[in-house]
Image (tube, rainbow, N blue to C red):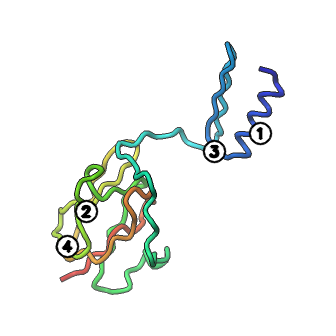
Amino acid sequence: MTVDEIRELINLAAETGIAELEVQRGENRVRIRRAAFAPTQEFVHSAPDVPPPPPAEAPKDKDRDQPPDPNLTLVKSPIVGTFYEAASPGAAPFVRVGERVQPGKVLCIIESMKLMNEIEAETSGIIDSKLVMNGQPVEYGEALFAIRAV
């Protein structure tokens, strides 16, 4: 491979925004990895073939930080990761909207760095709303559920 061909591959990677590109021609092999990206992660759960449609009326980010009702408690993500509502694909969700929960009840799993972290209810009440979709990435402190005190 010539230097010009390698430059062309670098430009291609930069233009398309891909994180990593590897090309092999005979004995020559070139790997281009953009520094702004972290290494890819393998996930235990498989994503659905077709992404689910967005909720009809998604709450605004500022609305997720403060419950509109003083009787609501927001369950927030303690880590950055991927939200899963069930233990495995095809399994029933841990909780559903309208279900009564007690402290210690598993609400969901947040996968972070290939570790599955169970998120439990800290208060008793009824699940008022689920604020994220299954398989969606979540940030630290992002609201996952709203629990209405009873």
Q: Quadrant of residue 84?
A: bottom left
- Which numbered marker is on residue 24? none
Q: Secondary structure at mark 4?
A: loop
Viewer-proximal residue, 89 or 60? Answer: 89
Contact (Cβ within 8 Å) of mark 3 with mark 4: no
Of pointers 2 and 3, the one earlier in the residue sequence: 3
Q: Give the mark toward the camera: 2 or 1.
A: 1
Residue 144 percent across, percent down from the top left? 36, 67
Label 1: which secondary element:
helix
Asked if residue 109 lies left or right of residue 27, the reply is left
| Amino acid type of the residue tagged 3 in the rendering | Ala
Kindly identify the amino acid type of the residue bearing the numbered disc 2: Leu
Tag on residue 107? 2
**Residue highlighted by disc 1:** 11
Q: Earlier in the sequence, mark 2 or mark 4?
A: 4
Q: Residue at x 67, y 46 (%)?
A: 17
Left or right of 26? Residue 103 is left
For the residue labelled by badge 3, is the local secondary structure a helix, a strand or a loop? loop
Q: Residue at x 37, y 57 (%)?
A: 83
* Structural distance between the alpha carbons of marks 2 and 3: 33 Å
Q: Quadrant of residue 35?
A: top right
Q: Are dots 2 and 4 in contact, CB under 8 Å?
A: no
> Reading the chain from its start, which is encountered first: label 1 or label 3?
1
Q: Residue at x 69, y 46 (%)?
A: 16
Q: From mark 1 to mark 3, how far is it between C-alphas?
A: 15 Å
